[in-house]
Image (spheres, coloured by chain):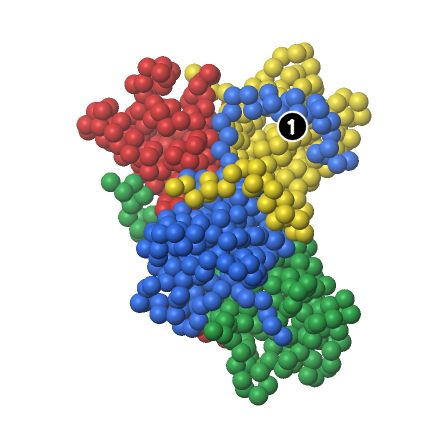
Chain colours: A red, B green, C blue, D yellow
Amino acid sequence: MKFNAIAGFSALALVSSQALANAVVVNQGLSEQEVLTAQQGWCNALVQISETHEDDGQAAAKELAKEVIDAAYGYQMGAVLFKPTLTVKPQTFRPTSEGALSYFVGGDPNFPSDSGFALKGWTQCDVDNNAVFIAGDSASTIGKVHFTGPDGTVTSVDKTWGFVKDDAGDVRIVLHHSSLEYQP
Amino acid sequence: MKFNAIAGFSALALVSSQALANAVVVNQGLSEQEVLTAQQGWCNALVQISETHEDDGQAAAKELAKEVIDAAYGYQMGAVLFKPTLTVKPQTFRPTSEGALSYFVGGDPNFPSDSGFALKGWTQCDVDNNAVFIAGDSASTIGKVHFTGPDGTVTSVDKTWGFVKDDAGDVRIVLHHSSLEYQP
Amino acid sequence: MKFNAIAGFSALALVSSQALANAVVVNQGLSEQEVLTAQQGWCNALVQISETHEDDGQAAAKELAKEVIDAAYGYQMGAVLFKPTLTVKPQTFRPTSEGALSYFVGGDPNFPSDSGFALKGWTQCDVDNNAVFIAGDSASTIGKVHFTGPDGTVTSVDKTWGFVKDDAGDVRIVLHHSSLEYQP
Amino acid sequence: MKFNAIAGFSALALVSSQALANAVVVNQGLSEQEVLTAQQGWCNALVQISETHEDDGQAAAKELAKEVIDAAYGYQMGAVLFKPTLTVKPQTFRPTSEGALSYFVGGDPNFPSDSGFALKGWTQCDVDNNAVFIAGDSASTIGKVHFTGPDGTVTSVDKTWGFVKDDAGDVRIVLHHSSLEYQP
């Protein structure tokens, strides 16, 4: 006997709505839709930083990028596990928000090899997931992300993201590994 | 600017379905519906054990109860935090499945004070949640549960349940505290 | 072959310290010691509120209780699943901080049956766990808590606590079910 | 007043051991040491597969690799988010254990571009973490891993791992993204 299957669905649905009639529900779990929204939000922000750079210059792009990083990454939790696509030793990883900001918009003498990934005139950014793992209040994704440049050329990267939901209910990136496709 | 709100909903929905077109999704999170189903499953099983006792005797009820405990509780994880309604010292808590089984169907000389809570002729069991907290891959509920006895009398208890999802995707009770209402 | 057992312990310890030499570690897990500290912190605070009441009156006790509730419970997450020992219908559960404060120090016309549990002159509070379940970033405990009153009499209750770690790293009570021992 | 700091440490330690005297403790959290052990276990297994290949041929190496993948990865949970170092489209990702096995030891006509990463004569494998994030019952790491080849040459990769603890208490890799260092 499959114990959980005792109740028929329609009977259950009826009972359930009674069971919750007066209940407060706090839900800290991450839904599939929230994960997809966070991914697409990252893509949209990248394109928007590129457009801001085009229209209003690096300073404006930097201001927007700072806002995006503060809202979308989890640096306030202590560190983010971040390996951007184009970084080199000894600054391959960017566990601080300063390092992330420099990667996206450049211009920071402490990170001399950064030219600003978000300033490359991206016009489109598409997510193509290979697998999504929702662990509950955290989730991971792996797959391709395709960036369309100003001349229409598409650059594809292999990208892993780790997301958590913070106390305020906002989804934040705590892990981000991006790499160019392997060329044999 | 609220970064996550950049994308309009309809545009997002379109992109999202593309983003998942070829993706495998593993979801270990607990949904509200799964929590309610597990609660109602517990209630249904209690009534069914009572009916089995009525129809087929204690041995059959015990067999069913064992099946239910194995399927619905998390004893195989090491222990369940279980304080049944009517237990007394020094066997107030039932961290092992033997103690749980004895509580529900009695007849175990190692638990001499147990008369079998599930053998009391219950005809109905209703859950009335006060609050539900879904932490991701675990969830807790607190509220009243109302038991209707053979003569139609309703007994209400204050009940807390803690649920987790096991590796097989089944929802299991790892915490269960039940108490009679306080009489001033 | 047990794959994880390949490395001998001393060799591993050496390698491990190298592996972490330059690493930032963010740890949101709850340790056993943190759980015990939170439990004993609750007990200590209860006694301290009783003493403050004795020494400085209800208003001072109320101020301290408010401070304790804000620091130790998770009401800012949306709700706490709280069934205090001595509450009655229709206010059995206290999903809001107002209800918790009234339970501990009384004097709130919205909760007319509350006389103030923390004002009863408690001189000692001891935790005696039956089982502890650490799920990772949350934990649950069940067991007895023994309260020593002003005349030395000890009152024992059955108590379940659920704890989580918030974004700031503080341990908070999100679940609390307390009940008098069953009297057959 | 810092509520949790009320109790002095020595007094607390005393009380705590009493609080747990008779308690069962189930701990599903991941410790730092367990994460490091899992990382080093992966490294040791890679070298051991290389040695087995050297000594006993591909079939023996394949058998060992299968054992390692079954024990160390979480394929039985539904999928692993795996981007190996040297894979190419359209088989960049390896969400199934067949794909993982082929990557490590080659010889699978379904994955024609795989030559067997674990057969390259590795003599040493060292983990150099940049950041570790322990979320509770899951953990992520990012950093360099250095592979020493048969001629002493060291190859470094950027590697992200995600670990969970399964119901049996074993640590399993559910996420693995590896990439060659970016060459500007």
The answer, for residue D90, to whether it is visible in the render is no
User: Which residue carries the number 1 mark?
Assistant: D40
Relative to A75, A4 lies left or right: right
| Residue at 54% over, 27% down | D159
Mark 1 neighbour class, 10 Å CA radius: few under 14, some 14 to 19, many 20 or more:
many
| Residue at 47% over, 67% down | C86
Residue A106 percent across, percent down from the top left: 32, 21
| Residue at 62% over, 39% down | D172
C5 and C74: which one is in front?
C74
In the picture as drawn, the residue positioned furthest to the bottom comes out as B151
A76 and D140: which one is in front?
A76
The answer, for residue C168, to whether it is visible in the render is yes
Q: Secondary structure at mark 1?
A: helix
Q: Quadrant of the N terminus of chain A?
A: bottom right
Residue C166 percent across, percent down from the top left: 44, 44
Residue A103 percent across, percent down from the top left: 36, 24
Relative to C115, C159 lies left or right: right
Relative to B105, C36 lies left or right: left
Q: Chain of mark 1?
A: D
- Tell me where residue B74 sits by quadrant: bottom right
Number of disc labels = 1
C6 and C173: which one is in front?
C173
Relative to B121, C48 lies left or right: left
Amino acid identity at mark 1: Gln
In the picture as drawn, the residue positioned furthest to the right comes out as D56
| Residue at 57% over, 26% down | D86
Q: Quadrant of the C terminus of chain A?
A: top right
Residue A175 percent across, percent down from the top left: 46, 34
Q: Is residue B1 above or below residue B147?
A: above
A125 and D37: which one is in front?
D37
